[in-house]
């Protein structure tokens, strides 16, 4: 066992004695991207940190050991989330960055002021905190880090406290309701009627109970209001000829229902988040239908920007809503831009919503999802449909284009949801040694959790000059995650696909992982069907094609450049039906081992025989036979 391995084993066990016996003259070792102190923070090695933290903090130049253990990457991937993309090109995860990713904000403040890091380190910290929705301010005397936004469970407890308190102020509520009759402020006994723009703006900036009694036309809307009442649109329409603000409502705490909103042409240059309806929804949005036939957004990215049809963040409920939108979104710069039809970050419920037919999103360097960007822990997406054509074109290096019919990333539940629209990615990155991956999925681009009773009938098309492609009718990638020290195996149940796959890559090492259900699979698949058809001939060795999955990785060791499989690819499956292809090359899946350098360059791909997959797990059949099985379903 070499020194670096011994140190790593000591860190995992928090064995101070063993660590001390190996650390002398080896303080500068970095296991791939991870210096020793960063590993101590990652594994919470309290004894070693207590005795060696100051000493290891003084290390500035690292001696990189290239054989970074894969188990470190797996643990860090789960912790880092979206921050992982900051380190895919061999950047060192410094100790202060590891603390920031672990949300040890007080420790970050203390460490930064004691060591006074460089401007480059400051920019890296800012990027990390922006990804977590926090802001950081630093001057010569102090460092300020704003608290993280409340998650769903924290907000639930906060609301519970509020509701409990309400029982003690019932008398005040009664007085408020009585006052409403004399002042014209609506309440639950008598709503205030709205007939014009002035009354509407007053309503949306206050509490109370309101009803819209007729259609209203607004020449210029330049407000960002906060609403905490009840608003019933009575299926009337608000026509907005010019939207000067970045959203109609800033924070929506109340209930808004039975309302139609029609926007005239919108043409904007953005430097901040943009939503047609609200920034944050904490309440209920029910049967609110939005139409915007012409939206053009030009974005010069310095920071990350999110764009949505309904809400940037949703911790309330959005249900029974319809969106008709045609948009062109062009972003430039160093930040990240994403568009989602309904919500960018969902921590609660989206249900019975439709991104309507005749809608389309044409985006440049902008990730696109039909319904939600991030479906976070504890959230649910239920009975939604996407009919909007989604196209992303990209040529920026170190950018990974993501397109999905329902969700870009799923950490929770997507149920009874359907994509009927065609999805497309065009990657024109022509840089030698180009970095990034294409992720395109009919339901989700990257799945860490559960998908049930979902269907994709939209064709998926990709053209890539140089970067790798992951494509799946349900998900581009399905990967396990770790939460509360427990490994969670994602599940795809009772789901199916009936679509055409068209993937073309140019460069020799622009590998493609193409599957009817998933491009890459690590999880459980039960009672699913695939009627996926392949438009092109994928005989070239760079294409990993399967009627079920493009690939599943195995645990391996390398000896003299020969790979030896230590364990089976982790796929648990039962009762799945796959369309038999005329060309026998379209096996059920290719089991692949990809050997990489730390910088991510692919050196070799080894495929294993498809006979690994038992007929009990996947049954090849004709289209007619599949339609006769209980697993098959269809819906328009």
Image (cartoon, helix red, strand yellow):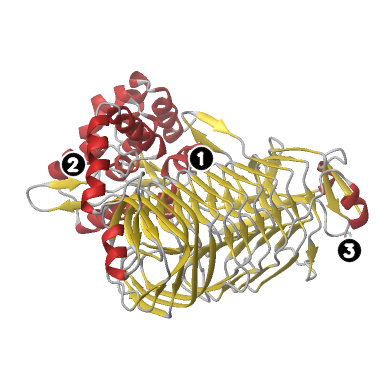
Quadrant placement of the C terminus: bottom right
* Residue 137 shown left or right of residue 455 in the figure: left
Quadrant of the image occupied by residue 580: bottom right
Circle number at residue 583: 3
| Nearest the eye: 213 or 294 | 213
Label 1 packing within 10 angstroms: few (<14), some (14-19), many (20+): few
> In the figure, is residue 195 to the left or right of 622?
left
- Under circle 1, the secondary element is helix
- Image x and y of residue 1, in percent: 49, 30
On the image, numbered disc 1 is attached to which residue?
74
Q: Which comes before the other along the chain, label 3 or label 1?
A: 1
**386 or 499, which is in the foreground?**
386
Q: CA distance from mark 3 to mark 1?
A: 37 Å
245 relative to 317, above or below: below
Secondary structure of residue under mark 2: helix
Percent across and percent down for residue 602 are 59, 58
In the depicted structure, whether residue 484 falls above or below residue 230: above
Contact between marks 3 and 1 (CB within 8 A): the answer is no
Q: Quadrant of residue 195?
A: bottom left
Of residues 365 and 169, which is closer to you in this image?
Answer: 169
The numbered mark, 3 or 2, whose residue comes first in the sequence reads: 2
Under tag 3, what secondary structure?
loop
Q: Residue at x 81, y 51 (%)?
A: 588
Location of mark 2 (residue): 109
Badge 3 crowding class, 10 Å Cα cut-off, few under 14, some 14 to 19, many 20 or more, is few
Label 3 and label 2: CA atoms lie apart by 61 Å
Name of the residue lying farthest toward the front: 182
């Amino acid at each position: 066992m070499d020194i670096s391995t011994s140190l790593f084993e000591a860190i995992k066990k928090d064995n101070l004695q063993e660590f001390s016996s190996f650390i002398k003259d080896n303080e500068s070792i970095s296991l791939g991207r991870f210096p020793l102190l960063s590993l101590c923070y990652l594994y919470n090695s309290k004894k070693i940190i207590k005795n060696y933290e100051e000493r290891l903090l003084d290390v500035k130049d690292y001696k990189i050991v290239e054989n970074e253990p894969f188990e470190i990457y797996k643990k860090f991937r789960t912790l880092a989330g979206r921050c992982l993309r900051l380190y895919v090109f061999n950047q060192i995860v410094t100790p202060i960055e590891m603390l920031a990713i672990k949300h040890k904000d007080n420790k970050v403040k203390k460490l930064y002021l004691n060591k006074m890091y460089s401007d480059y380190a400051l920019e890296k910290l800012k990027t990390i905190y922006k990804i977590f929705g926090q802001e950081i301010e630093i001057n010569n005397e102090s460092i300020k880090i704003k608290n993280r936004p409340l998650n769903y469970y924290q907000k639930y407890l906060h609301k519970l406290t509020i509701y409990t308190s309400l029982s003690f102020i019932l008398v005040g509520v009664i007085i408020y309701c009585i006052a409403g009759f004399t002042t014209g402020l609506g309440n639950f006994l008598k709503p205030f009627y709205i007939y014009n723009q002035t009354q509407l703006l007053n309503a949306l900036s206050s509490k109370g109970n309101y009803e819209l009694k007729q259609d209203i036309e607004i020449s210029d809307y330049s407000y960002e209001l906060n609403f905490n009442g009840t608003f019933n649109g009575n299926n009337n329409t608000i026509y907005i000829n010019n939207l000067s603000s970045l959203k109609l409502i800033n924070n929506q705490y109340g209930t808004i229902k039975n309302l139609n909103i029609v926007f005239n042409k919108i043409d904007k240059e953005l430097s901040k988040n943009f939503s047609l309806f609200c920034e944050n929804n904490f309440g209920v949005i029910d049967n609110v239908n939005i139409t915007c036939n012409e939206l053009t957004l030009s974005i010069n990215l310095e920071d990350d920007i999110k764009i949505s049809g309904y809400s940037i963040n949703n911790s309330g409920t959005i249900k029974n809503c319809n969106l008709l939108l045609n948009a062109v979104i062009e972003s430039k710069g160093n930040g990240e831009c994403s568009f989602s039809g309904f919500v960018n970050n969902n921590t609660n419920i989206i249900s019975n919503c439709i991104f309507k037919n005749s809608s389309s999103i044409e985006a440049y360097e902008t990730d696109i999802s039909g319904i939600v960007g991030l479906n976070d822990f504890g959230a649910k997406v239920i009975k939604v449909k996407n009919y909007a054509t989604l196209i992303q074109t990209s040529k920026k290096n170190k950018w990974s284009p993501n397109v999905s019919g329902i969700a870009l990333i799923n950490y929770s539940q997507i149920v009874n949801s359907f994509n009927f629209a065609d999805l497309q990615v065009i990657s024109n990155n022509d840089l030698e040694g180009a970095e990034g991956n294409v992720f395109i999925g009919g339901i989700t681009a990257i799945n860490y959790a559960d998908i049930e009773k979902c269907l994709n009938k939209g064709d998926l098309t990709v053209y890539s000059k140089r970067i790798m492609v992951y494509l799946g009718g349900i998900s581009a990638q399905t990967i396990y995650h770790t939460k509360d020290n427990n490994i969670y195996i994602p599940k795809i149940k009772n789901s199916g696909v009936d679509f055409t796959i068209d993937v073309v890559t140019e460069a020799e090492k622009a590998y493609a992982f193409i599957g009817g259900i998933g491009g890459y699979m690590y999880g459980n698949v039960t009672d699913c069907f695939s009627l996926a058809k392949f438009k092109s001939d994928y005989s070239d060795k760079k294409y990993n094609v399967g009627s079920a999955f493009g690939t599943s990785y195995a645990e391996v060791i390398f000896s003299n450049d020969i790979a030896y499989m230590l364990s089976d690819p982790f796929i648990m499956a039962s009762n799945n039906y796959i369309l038999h292809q005329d060309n026998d090359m379209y096996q059920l899946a290719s089991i692949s081992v990809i050997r990489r350098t730390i910088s991510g360059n692919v050196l070799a791909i080894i495929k294993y025989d498809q006979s690994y997959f038992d007929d009990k797990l996947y049954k090849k059949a004709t289209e007619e036979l599949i339609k006769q099985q209980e697993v098959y379903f269809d819906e328009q």
